[in-house]
Image (cartoon, rainbow, N blue to C red):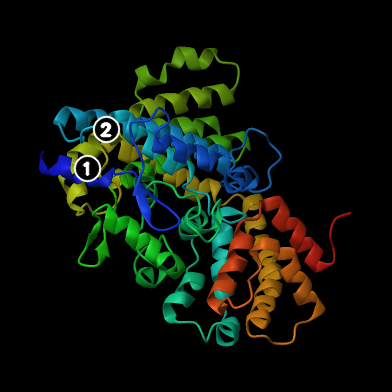
Amino acid sequence: MSSHQEQWSRLLAPYRKTRQDKNLAPLDVVRNPFVQDYDRIIFSSSFRRLAKKTQVHPLVRNDHIHNRLTHSLEVSCVGRSLGLQVGQALAEKGDLPEGFTPDHLGQIIQAACLAHDIGNPPFGHAGEEAIRDWFKDTGHTEHYFKELRPAERADFVAFDGNAQGFRVINTLENNKDAGGFRLTFPVLASLVKYPRSAHEALGQSSGKFNFYTAEQAVFTDIFTTLGLMRDDRARRHPLSYLLEAADDICYRIIDMEDARELRIITYQDIKNAMAPLLGDEDMDAGRLNAMDSDRRRSGMLRTRAMSCIIPSVVQTFLDNYEDIMNGTLQGDLLKHAEKNVADFMAAAKEVFNNKIMNNPQKTALEIGTYTLYKRLLDIFIPACFNFSKKNPMSYQETRALTLMGSNAPAEGECLYTAYLRVLDFVSGMTDDYATFISQQFSGTAAQ
């Protein structure tokens, strides 16, 4: 067995958490464990609620615009294609362990991609920023968080949908507080783009992280079992690079398509951004001109772009294979992409930053997001604080805990866990429900 084959045999081992510890799920079944993972995710309430969560454009009434659920489905398709093609290349190298096929790699990435946004709060990145800013407020910090350890405080002031997603998957869904979905370890590790805690991420350039202090033990178990811990530091699972690329490819292309649908940009803007990627032959001007709408033309360009980018990203993975396997690759795959792909991503990013992000309606809604989250957290955090400290509680605070339902803190839970329960409840809301509850709290709910 070659060194890489031995490494992959550990990286792909389908361990799954059980009530007591973990076991190795059987691979030689018709519905293998990675397919089971996909099914567990797609039938969950957390995944279903993504249909009412913002991808980029909040509270739009145009049915053609993507939400988090449709985005996740599309990312899973691109991820599957990347996994299959990389898997085929590894099989030809002789690096796939016995019993594994390219299909298995495609299935692992497909399941991981399906769940990659499952922890995102209402109103997407604007919601993340609003939550962080509330917890960074000096008055809140001095009153509510002075008893928390620095690592625990970091989870709130650096709130990130990636870490919340890791918690949803491993703690909240299906087997609540007892393993969550209990997905296979390769799928769980492939989800992790930033293998560090909030406390470790603070002060770093990106500030991104993938797990809370509460899930530290789960994370360590997964990454140790798969051979991804070195000198007490975790390194990324090789397949996580493919998940990240699939996400980046989709949102760069699809965000432009949605913006054109909303008349924020034009079809010509999309065509110009595609120019580094698609030559005249790829553009197929005759067929484009024969189409009856810019929506169809944009869809055709998206298809052509995907067909160029996917094999290019696979080649980039193979070109950087040794660094990926050694855990020494700097940055994501697209940072090392071939020139035509890199130029397209740069052009699409410029359109996004300069035109899409600065759309007045989008900006106004994002500003309103801060007011929405302030109303919610101004009530739920004090309620949980007084409950955990056994302080006298107002009628409003008592009713707030009732509203939280199964997400409310239990008797005896520490303050840190009580605050996590608030994040679980608030970040799990849909855009519409969060808006409704905020309006209720303001006393001006729509009739």
Q: Which mark is residue 270?
A: none
Q: Amino acid at mark 1?
A: Trp
Expressed as whole percent of the image width and height from the top left, the position of residue 444 reads 85, 63
Contact flag, marks 2 and 1 (Cβ < 8 Å): yes
Image position of 183 with respect to 253: above or below:
below
Q: Residue 280 occupies which quadrant of the picture?
A: top left
* Residue 243 appears in view: yes
Outermost front residue? 20
* Side of 219 where 117 appears, left or right: right
In the rendered structure, which amino acid carries the disc numbered 2?
Phe
Q: Which of the two discs, 2 and 1, labels the residue nearer the N terminus? A: 1
Q: Residues within 10 Å of mark 2 (few under 14, many from 20)?
A: some
Q: Which residue is mark 1?
A: 8
Can you say whether 56 is above or below 279 in the image? Answer: below
Q: Is 260 located above or below residue 226 in the figure?
A: above
Report the residue at 68% width, 36% height from top.
62
Question: Is residue 253 shown left or right of residue 135?
Answer: left
What residue is shown at x 15% (from left), y 31% (from top)?
Answer: 93
User: Dot 2 corresponds to which residue?
Assistant: 100
Q: Secondary structure at mark 2?
A: loop
Q: CA distance from mark 2 to mark 1?
A: 10 Å
91 over 288 or under it: above or below = below
- Quadrant of res 206: bottom left
Measured as percent of width and height from the top left, residue 302 is found at 46, 28
What percent of the width, then of the height, locates residue 136? Answer: 53, 76
Of 56 and 295, nearer the camera is 56
Q: Is residue 46 left or right of residue 11?
A: right
Image quadrant holding the N terminus, namely: top left
